[in-house]
Image (spheres, grey):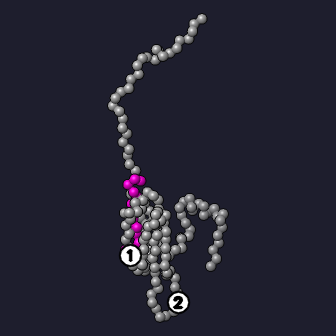
């Protein structure tokens, strides 16, 4: 199949601005990421994946998810084989304001969910302002410092 790609497509620019897309990303590991309060949630669709094959690792600020989906053993010949198989990997580069030490991962009903809290140092906070209770006074009056113009 041949896809028509026009780099000057005005509708593509509008879709980018609006956050819409005419085509979904083709991947063996589709993903959604959103912010919910003081943490981020990343959900990966991994139906049919053995939970033992899923690996989540963090190296610096790079989070990598890998998983493997194997074909069921069958002695017959496939007539249709559309489900993706093999080893898949997604890597996310995370900001420094996330607390990767408290990352939580769960796998339920074919969906891997990662919950990543925002670090305490990055959360909005109120800064108290100190002020002195002592008053400051200036001695003298403004007229004492005024120079008089010479008279002729």
Q: Is residue 85 above or below residue 148?
A: below
Residue in view at x 39 percent, y 78 percent: 51
Magenta-drawn segment: 108-123
Quarter that holds the N terminus: bottom right
Q: Residues within 10 Å of mark 2 (few under 14, many from 20)?
A: few
Q: Which numbered tag is attached to residue 79? A: 2
Task: Pick whichever, 20 or 58, lies toward us.
Answer: 58
Image marks 2 and 1: residues in contact by CB distance under 8 Å: no
Q: Is residue 127 above or below residue 120?
A: above
CA gap, disc 2 to disc 1?
27 Å
- Residue 129, x across and y down, in percent: 37, 39
Q: Residue furthest top?
A: 152
Q: Could you say whether the residue bearing mark 2 is in a helix, strand or loop?
A: loop
Residue in view at x 51 percent, y 92 percent: 77
Q: Residue furthest front?
A: 60
Q: Residues within 10 Å of mark 1 (few under 14, many from 20)?
A: few
- Residue 71, x across and y down, in percent: 47, 85
Q: Could you say whether the residue bearing mark 1 is in a helix, strand or loop?
A: loop
Q: Which numbered tag is attached to residue 59? A: none
Q: Is residue 42 above or below residue 131?
A: below
Tell whether position 119 is magenta: yes
Tell whether position 28 is magenta: no
Q: Which numbered tag is attached to residue 109? A: 1
Residue in view at x 53 percent, y 61 percent: 19
Determine if residue 92 is in view.
yes
Sequence-first tag of 2 and 1 = 2
Quarter that holds the C terminus: top right
């Amino acid at each position: 199949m041949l896809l028509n790609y026009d780099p000057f497509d005005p509708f593509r620019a509008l879709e980018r601005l609006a956050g819409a897309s005419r085509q979904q990303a083709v991947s063996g590991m589709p993903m959604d990421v959103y912010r919910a309060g003081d943490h981020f949630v990343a959900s990966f669709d991994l139906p049919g994946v053995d939970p033992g094959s899923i690996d989540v690792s963090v190296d610096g600020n790079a989070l990598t998810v890998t998983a493997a989906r194997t074909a069921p053993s069958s002695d017959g010949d496939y007539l249709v084989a559309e489900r993706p198989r093999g080893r898949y990997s997604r890597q996310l580069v995370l900001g420094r304001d996330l607390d990767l030490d408290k990352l939580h991962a769960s796998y339920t009903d074919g969906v891997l969910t990662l919950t990543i809290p925002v670090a305490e140092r990055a959360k909005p906070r109120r800064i108290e302002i100190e002020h002195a209770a002592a008053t400051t006074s200036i001695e003298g009056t403004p007229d004492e410092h005024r120079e008089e113009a010479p008279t002729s």
